[in-house]
Every structure is written in C-alpha cells, then in structure tokens.
Amino acid sequence: MRSTYLQKRYSLLGVAFVAALVFAVAAAATLSGWMVLLFAVFAALFALGVYDVIQARHAVLRNYPIIGHIRYLMESIRPEIRQYLLESDRDEEPFSRETRSLVYQRAKGVEDKKPFGTSERVYDSGYAWVTHSINPKHITNSDFRVRIGGKNCLQPYDASIYNISAMSFGALSANAIKALNAGAKIGGFAHDTGEGGISIHHRQGGALIYQVASGYFGCRNDKGGFDPQKFAAQAADPQIKMIEIKLSQGAKPGHGGMLPASKITPEIAAARGIPMGIDCVSPAAHSEFSTPLELMDFVARLRDLSGGKPVGLKLCIGHRREFMCMVKAMLQTGISPDFIVVDGKEGGTGSAPLEFANRVGMPMLEGLHFVHNTLRGAGLREEIRIGAAGKIVTAFDIARALALGADWCNSARGFMFAIGCIQAQACHTNKCPVGIATQDTLRQRALDPDDKSTRVARFHSNTLKALGEIAGAAGLDCPNDFLPYHLMFRQTDNAFRDGNEVYAYLPEGFLLSKDPHPDLREWQSRWGRAAADSFAPKEIPHGPFSIAAQ
C-alpha cells in the first residue's frame, strides 16, 4: 500500500513540477531579455514531460516524468562512481586498483614499492605465497628466455618468458597495435596477432606470433576456407616467428563471432582478406579438420608451409578427454605441436556472452596443471613447450604459472594497462575513452604510439626484474626452476598445503602403463576413453580403467 501511495505521490509531483514550471514561464513571459531563454528551457522540459507520460518503452518515465531520467543518468555513470569512489584497492572488477596501479607505475618507470605492509588477507582461504630461501641468490640478467621448437622444427625461436597475448586489429585500434608491436621490438619479446590477421600496423619490427583461427584471416580463400599459398606467403615473413592454431579462447570457448559489415574498414578488410560490405563470420569450429588425426596433419602442413617455423595450439580446456584424444593422435602419428598455449577461462575479450564469460571453460591453473600432467603421462612433455595465459600481470602470477608447468606466459590486459587502459569496460561499444579498443579515428588520436611503446617495453622489463627478484629470494638461479613445492596454498582459514599436494607433477609415462595406478585411476580411465581418430568418447569394457569420465 505504501509503495502504491508513493508511486502516485511522486507521479503527481512530477506533473505538478511541470505545471509549476509552465506557470512560472507564463508569468515571466511578460518580461523581456534573458527570461526568453528560461522560457525556452521550461518549454523543453514541458515537452519532455509530456513525451515521458505518453511513451510506452520505459515504465519508470511514464510514472515519474522528467525526474525519472535521473535514474538512467545515475545508472550510466555507475561504473565510474564505483571505480573512483567506492571500490577498495583489492576489489577485482575484474582487475583490482592495486594491480592496475602496479602496471601503470612499472610502465611509467616510477616508484612501484608499497609502504606499511600487505593489505592481503593472508589467513583467508585462497591466499598463496612463495616460499623463500635462507640463502637467496642475486640475479642480474632478467632477460629470461625459452627455446620453442621440437624435433621437426627447422627455425626454433628463443622467446621471452613474458609476451603479449592475442588481440586482433579491429578489436584494438591502429595506434594500440602500433604501440604494442613497437614496444615488443624495443623489449625483444613477442606479440601475438590475434585471429584478425596481420595489418600494416603490426609492421613496427616486433616479433609476431601469427594466429590462424577458424576464419583463416590473412590466409583464406574466397569461400572462407584455408588457402595454403596465401598462408605460405604470410608465414615466409621473417617478422613472423611462430604459428599458433587457435582452437578456442578462454573468455568464450566454443563460441564463434561476427564482425558486422558496418564495422569493417578498408584496413580491416585488407588484414583479414575479406570483402567490404559483407558481415565477417568467425565459425566456432575449424573447417580444415574435425578429428585429432586431421588436426595433427594440419600442424604438419603449417610447419612445412612456413619453412619449419614453430607451430602450436592455443586452447581453453573443456572436455579433458578431448585433449587426451589430441595427445593420442600425437603418439600415433609421430606429429606433435611445438607448443601449446593454455588459455584460462578468466581470459579477457572485447565482447562475450555473459554465460560464456562466467561459466564456460576451465580456469588457467587447473587447465595448465591438466595439460602439463597429460603430456608428462604420455612421455611428450620434453618435446612440447607450454605457454599460459589468463590474468597474468604481476611477477607472482608468472612465478605461479611457471611452478605449475608453464615454460612462458602471455598477457593481454596487462599490456593494455601499460598503454593506458583504465578498465572502462567499453571495449564492445567502439567508445573506448583512451583510444585502445575502438576504430573511431578521433578517439584513437588520444593514444600516442611513440610514448606508449616505451611504456610497453618498460612494463615488460620491470616485471621481469621483479620476477628475477622473487626467483632469487626463493634461492633459484632462474624463474624456470620454480616447482610446485616453492608455493603454498591456504585452502581453509586455519590450514595450508604445499604446492606438491595441490598441483602435483604426476609420474612420467603413467598414461602409457598397462598397470592401474591406485591414485590415478580417473586419469587412466579418461585416457582409456580417448581415441586418436575421433573427439567422441570411446566406450571401453568394464575393468580397472572403466570409470566413466569426460
């Protein structure tokens, strides 16, 4: 009853407010000069009030003419109010202010130290830390690298252990791509092109990882399929150091995409090899392969067409058995990728359905642990390098991923922060306030590629220096020496576990053993249900490995 009363009351107040304004204007109309301006304002308000009452789209405005617009105004600036006035330094939306500030400081080369101790809740569940040594090391060279390229690779690449993750031109602006690639050149690390092909803005001299996704942009034929000749021409460029076959991405695994014709510029069309005026579709699945064996054949073809450059896979883990199908195909064919990038579901994107962003795909830590141990179990871990991606921004993030089995890490949003991203989360609107995630030429001009490229290189360098300090504190000579036991994880408010207990390295070759392992029956059962010739589950007879599991 009270709410009904208030509704009627405020509705009447709105009408009365308009009537009062009209009366005031009428009274003032007998005067001259500046009162004419007031009359125009009040007349506009009166017209707005009438429109609000008769329109049928917004119920709030019909009941509360004029003043109801305040609600929509406050709703539109809610993210800014929260970010600048309400959120704490540690609220992750999705990145905390503390993390963003650290990137800004390292990118600018200013003081990044923190006074007065940690603000972390060190006794809360989920807290993790690095165990340090009583005999720390001093690491002077922080240019940490890993060689990528297996036995069939003719042009291995010595990659930095921290690189720019996949972000396409089209999702990012021309100036953003220029800044990132020029920064990669200065810092001597790699820049993943994303699935949108290689644009003229990528040609700043920085090492490129050419991503080949289901749309085959930059190497597609007129029907949208893969074109070997176009791929070979692209891959021959010495700026391209590695080829990455994208199977899925963490933010929206199993979901395709579509770039409307209205958003396709001549530059985007040239980079992707698509016509103007037609919607550009990225299918959810590849058309070049549909089985694990066909996927391995595609890996071999790309390696041959590229002149022996490293070829790898990028995926977010879904059905674990399906990844085991790929590993069985590697064993059967003798063809394996040179690397696998494990993308966590916490990875970012310019646009994804909420359900996919929140509830589809495996987080990075679990996905990395699974891929690392599956390759160990199949005896392939030494042949294949593993990259990790998914909210890896700080030196601790890198150290944790390396300890769990990664050889190197990629970051997208970390480097976006380095070129000025303020986490406005307007990437999908073409209205990025800092000119990063937009094709609006007026907004793009706010980003100076020369200045931001220096920040990209500086952020990379300072982060690796911090990583070297953490590794030295743990008594290690190199960050790649991190192992699970160098980490501790608090799982309840009064107990913690060694990293070996939470993310253990499983025995080499255990999946190839014919004898059941008492502690690894679920792994062995899933392996038994995997087949090299199909991603579909294989039925197996009842026995020691008969636990049904995806």
Image (tube, rainbow, N blue to C red):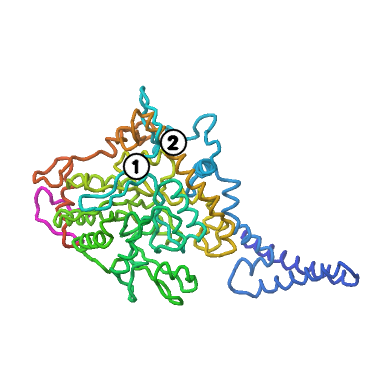
Q: CA distance from mark 1 to mark 2?
A: 15 Å
- Element type where label 2 sits in the image: helix
In what quadrant of the picture does the C terminus appear?
bottom left
1 or 2: tag closer to the N-terminus: 1
Residue at the disc numbered 2: 466
State whether the magenta stretch is mostly helix, strand or loop: loop
Residue 51 x %, y %:
67, 74
Q: Is residue 125 above or below residue 314?
A: above
Please give left or right for residue 302 compared with residue 199 in the image. Answer: left
The region drawn magenta spans 535-550
Please give left or right for residue 150 compared with residue 237 in the image. Answer: left
Q: Is residue 226 magenta?
A: no
Dot 2: few (<14), some (14–19), or many (≥20) neighbours within 10 Å?
some
Q: Is residue 542 magenta?
A: yes
Dot 1: few (<14), some (14–19), or many (≥20) neighbours within 10 Å?
some
Residue at the disc numbered 1: 145
* Dot 1 amino acid type: Arg
Residue shown at the point (23%, 44%) measured from the top left: 373
Residue 422 x %, y %:
54, 51
In what quadrant of the picture does the N terminus appear?
bottom right
Q: Is residue 61 above or below residue 420?
A: below
Tell me, yes or no, if residue 359 can be seen here: no
Residue shown at the point (25%, 56%) measured from the top left: 308
- Element type where label 1 sits in the image: strand
Total number of numbered labels? 2
